[in-house]
Image: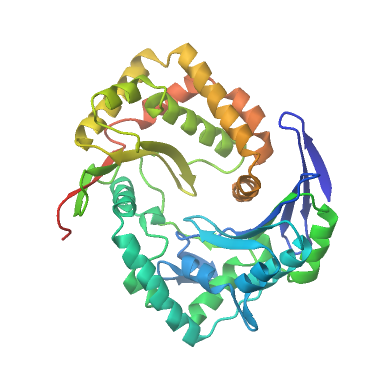
Amino acid sequence: MISKEYPRIGETLYHAQLENGLHIYVDRRPEFQKSYAFFATNYGGMDMKFRLDGQWQDTPAGVAHFLEHKMFDTEDGNALQDLAANGASPNAFTSSAITGYFFESTEKFYDNLKILLSFVSVPYFTQESVDKEQGIIGQEIRMVEDDPDNQVFYALMECLYDHHPIQVPIAGTQQSIACITADTLYACHKAFYTPSNMVLTVAGDVDPEMVCRIAREILPAESGGSIERDYGGEENDKASVSVKELKMEVSTPIFQLGFKADPAPAGEERLRRQLMGELACEALLGNSSPLYASLYEKGLINANFAYGFEIYPGCALMAAGGESRDPVQVRDAVLAEGERIAREGIDEALFARLKKGLYGARVRAMNSFENVCIELAQAHFAGVEYFRFPEVFDQIQKSDVEDCICRWVTGARCGLAVVRPGESV
């Protein structure tokens, strides 16, 4: 295991690649009582079509999420209960791009790590338990379908993308999960829950070498091959549909406004693109921006307004949303501000403040073990050395951010999704 110093953020990161291909990262934090472990696979809701044993598999929407639910089942009981009995706080999540299992604990860390690695690497499903889970997840899907915030998000994805699976709900649909069988879950586990497609990240006062020894002891000695995935081909740079409207039981219209950004390559450029996108959001939409103050004063947005920049394999987007009495007017104002910035640029003093603020927020986020472990895992899958973010941040110029706004914030790349008051149809 090797260690590397990151003096800009005062961190030492230990890294090893095991013989089976698994990468392990340990951010050792001496004198902290709490420790955190995150075991993730590079497999999420949009990985529905892939090649396994030379054959293309086209799996139903929602398998990654369904598999996450079922992985806690063991032949002897339930891993959640085992971890809780050991004083750990465990959980898991599935995003469009990854699935992660984690726990935090102040005692019995190594015992809990063994449990985590064991249940994630050894699947145990029966058709009876799968049938039961279909009912549980089906109820979860119905709740999501009644959630306006969730529905307006996926409506925006349908506006922006022609075919990329980012527009498919992570949990799937009632129809898609009905097609999932125990054999489906075993096939997807075989394909994606293989050491070379996974990463283990740990933060806390732990022994990095002990973490490696436990991983070697518990996990398979060999790994499967790389996974070829199909996201439906390259998207063009235009939004698929300019506007999509729904009706649900809301008191005020809810909207999501998005701009189709350029996909980011793997490696350090991906981190650079992420930071540029976040700065572009702050300059265009942030609380300190001229546009935000104008929209707020006119009563077009309120304190629920939120924004962000997201990168996934094969796609990236800027998005903002919340409640508004006139979402179309908000969209038009954002487009007009994008045009103004393209002509006049971003105010120098404002850019300096935004850059300092965003850098500070990233440094403060290092205080969260959960954030550190998840960021390290996501960065690994993207080919990024996450703790180098200060150096990458230094390289970003005002002109880089202005160029992003000029290219991305256009009518052709814009999609607007709105949920208006009324009965759904």
Answer left or right for 323 relative to 370: left
Q: Position of residue 316 (x, y in %)?
A: 44, 42
Instruction: Indicate whether 305 appears above or below 373.
Output: above
Q: Nearer the viewer, residue 83 or 406?
A: 83
Q: Position of residue 69 (x, y in %)?
A: 51, 70
At 53% from the left and 74% from the top, the residue drawn is 70
In the rendered image, is residue 190 in sight?
yes
Q: Position of residue 78 (x, y in %)?
A: 60, 77
In the rendered image, is residue 259 in sight?
no
Answer left or right for 303 relative to 82: left
* Image coloring type: rainbow
Q: Position of residue 193 (x, y in %)?
A: 61, 67
Q: Quadrant of residue 306?
A: top left
At 44% from the left and 56% from the top, the residue drawn is 231
Q: How many marks?
A: 0
Instruction: Indicate whether 142 appears above or below 239.
Output: below
Q: Quadrant of residue 406?
A: top left
Instruction: Indicate whether 380 appears above or below 359.
Output: below
Which quadrant is home to the C terminus? bottom left
Instruction: Indicate whether 136 appears above or below 88.
Output: below
Q: Nearer the viewer, residue 82 or 218?
A: 82
At 66% from the left and 28% from the top, the residue drawn is 391
